[in-house]
Image (cartoon, grey):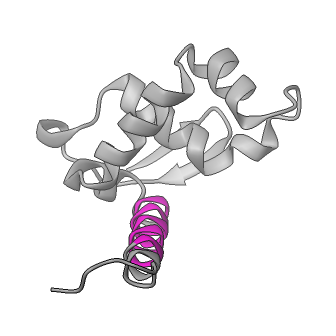
Amino acid sequence: MLASRRRGWHCRSVSRASALSAEEEAVLDFERSWWLVRTHRTKQEAIRAELCLSPTRYYAQLESLAESPAALAYDPLLVRRLRRRRDQRRRALFAAGNDRPGQRRR
């Protein structure tokens, strides 16, 4: 199904049974194109102004959406990018944890 979006066209195929809420769609749409909103100096300001969410709530919701099959169906490129970035952060965190001096190895 081809749907017109606030910031352009986006092709998606989501069944109504597993559809996302309007807020979840708005979070994904915002993450996909937040840099196009040039009225705010920082991403946190844009999150508050556009979505009326705190940045903490926004990132928590974004993290849970990265695991959602409905979000993957809604915007596969964005969700895969979110998962890839999350995995890179985790790998870096675990690699840094193994290099600390004085830490016991099991």
Please state which of residues 8 and 83 is positioned toward the viewer in this rendering: 83
Left or right: residue 35 compared with residue 48: right
Establish if 22 lies above or below 4.
Answer: above
Establish if 48 lies above or below 98.
Answer: above
Residue at image position (77%, 45%) is 35
Query: Residue 22 at what x, y percent from top left?
Result: 38, 24
Res. 23 image quadrant: top left
Q: Name the dominant secondary structure of the magenta segment.
A: helix
Left or right: residue 97 compared with residue 52: left
Establish if 5 lies above or below 106.
Answer: above
Please state which of residues 45 and 38 is positioned toward the viewer in this rendering: 45
Residue at image position (37%, 75%) is 94
Q: How many marks?
A: 0
Is 89 one of the magenta-colored residues? Answer: yes
Res. 99 image quadrant: bottom left
Is 95 one of the magenta-colored residues? Answer: no
Query: Residue 90 at what x, y percent from top left?
Result: 39, 69
Residue at image position (30%, 57%) is 73
Residue at image position (45%, 78%) is 100
Which residues, given as a range, are shown in magenta?
A: 78-93
